[in-house]
Image: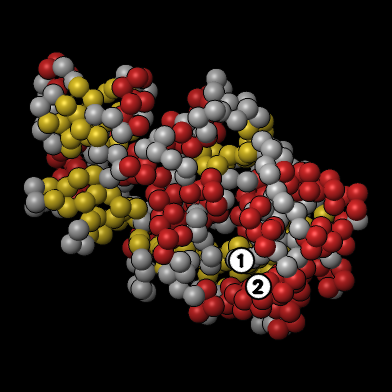
Amino acid sequence: MQREIEFTDDFKQNLNDFLGEKKAELCMEAMKKQDKTIRVNTLKISKKELLDRLKNKLKLEAVNFYEYAFRVNNYPKEGLGNLMEHFFGYFYVQSLSSMLPVLVLNPKKNTKVLDLASAPGGKTSQIAQHMENTGLLLANDNNYSRISALVNNCSRLGVLNMVVTKRDGRSFRKPEFDKVLLDAPCSGDGSYSKKIKEWNEKKSRNFGELQRELLMSAFNSLKPGGELVYSTCTFSANENERVVSKVLKRFENAELQRIEIKGLNCSRGLKEYGEEMDKCLRIWPHEIQSEGFFIAKIKKVKE
Amino acid sequence: MKDFSSFINNTYSIKLPKNLMLLEDEEKVSIMTKEAFDYKEKNERKGMIAGRKLEMGYKPSTDFLQMFGNLAKKNFVVLNENESLGFAKGENISLDEKRIEKLEKWFLIVKNGEGAVLGCGYLRGNTLENNIPKYRRIFAGKRKEEIEE
């Protein structure tokens, strides 16, 4: 599917600085042509059963690095959301990049997980799926209308281990979670065409400050030995490497973990913010035919 | 009024998995894991809404029935492919006498021919009234996840 996107001069300049002119062009082309992808919801159906059901409706292509992800190579005219399998909650329409943070988080059965900025619920329901609907998944967001989307989506997908809270994410401090996902609010230029138009350096710096505070809360909420994943859908270093680097400096017991996803074509974090940023992932649209993303994983080592 | 667990057992012969908990307030019943049930701090929602309380019993939710309705042994209706599609769109379905003879005049579980549960319908006369919430129906407009994910 081709999308109309208006790239501003500010945005183009920023992208050129990261990638050079040639790759920046490739990246912008890829942003216009992002593939539609779905995630099989194994809380309700097995992968095999869903593939059997969809074989005459969709041309699905497996993704080599995530067993539940499929690219949709023939977008149905009625839309994916109007298929009966969607109605039954057998799959969720989710961009490939946005499945990666949960893959990195790797939540387990019977644990306690916090999703600090959870709406509209794609990653939340993916966490529940990996937890096999056991334990406790605390899904927080600070906006009522977004919480409504979160609840509707997770209910359709059969999530039973979730408690929803409406709090300022910066208020979480109690060290009680095995894992925390912070898919942070961001300037969104890796993903949303509307946000690309509005993107500027100042806005991005403001987000950086909020993200630093949220990441500190996420870290404080971890039990010793626990792990968090920080992700955004922006290219801006102000909201990515700079935020991670500040929080690592703030906590002596924060240890950046190297992320490896076998088969994923991606780049590494920018070393100008510290050699170890190489452990983080930068997902460029032209490398994955999906949204731009940044992902970091931090462990709270025992003091 | 009996509790929700006995109600769905009596009405549909559904026995819920023992590891799940039910939480009732004045208006609704929710179903969740024990860990979610035990969470004590202020919250907006726990688990999934299983049903709404009515004077004479409960109305089970579409989401609940899509998870557990396939365990039902009675008070369910099976629709053919065309009827199923219509029901998922929000249409009422006319049923002939033969198809409704053993059914109670209450909220019924509605399945398709493959055994997948579509949701809940209320039998009034020969008409199966659609009780799928508007936002859950297909062809109900653009969905939020497709806008925001």
Residue under the point 28% across and 49% down: B50
Q: Are the residues at dot 2 and dot 1 in contact (C-beta closer than 8 Å)? A: yes
With A290 as the anchor, is B144 left or right in this view? Answer: left
- The percent coordinates of residue A135 (x first, y second) are 45, 59
| Tag 2 subunit | A
Number of other residues with Cα within 10 Å of mark 2, as a class: few under 14, some 14 to 19, many 20 or more = some
Residue under the point 29% across and 55% down: B30
Helix, strand, or loop for circle 1? loop
Helix, strand, or loop for circle 2? helix
- The percent coordinates of residue A263 (x first, y second) are 77, 43
Residue A15 has which mark? none
| Numbered circles on residues, count | 2
Residue under the point 24% across and 49% down: B51
Q: Earlier in the sequence, mark 2 or mark 1?
A: 1
Query: Residue A148 versus residue A280: which sits nearer the camera?
Result: A148
| Residue type at numbered disc 2 | Phe
Q: Which residue is mark 1?
A: A184
- The percent coordinates of residue A235 (x first, y second) are 75, 61
Query: Residue A110 versus residue A27: which sits nearer the camera?
Result: A27
Q: Residue B75: name its quadrant.
A: top left
Question: Looking at the image, is A287 positioned above or below residue B105?
Answer: below
Number of other residues with Cα within 10 Å of mark 1, as a class: few under 14, some 14 to 19, many 20 or more = many
| Residue type at numbered disc 1 | Ala
Q: Residue B62: name its quadrant.
A: top left
Q: Which residue is mark 2?
A: A207
Q: How is the image coloured?
A: secondary structure
Distance in Å between CA atoms under marks 2 and 1: 9 Å
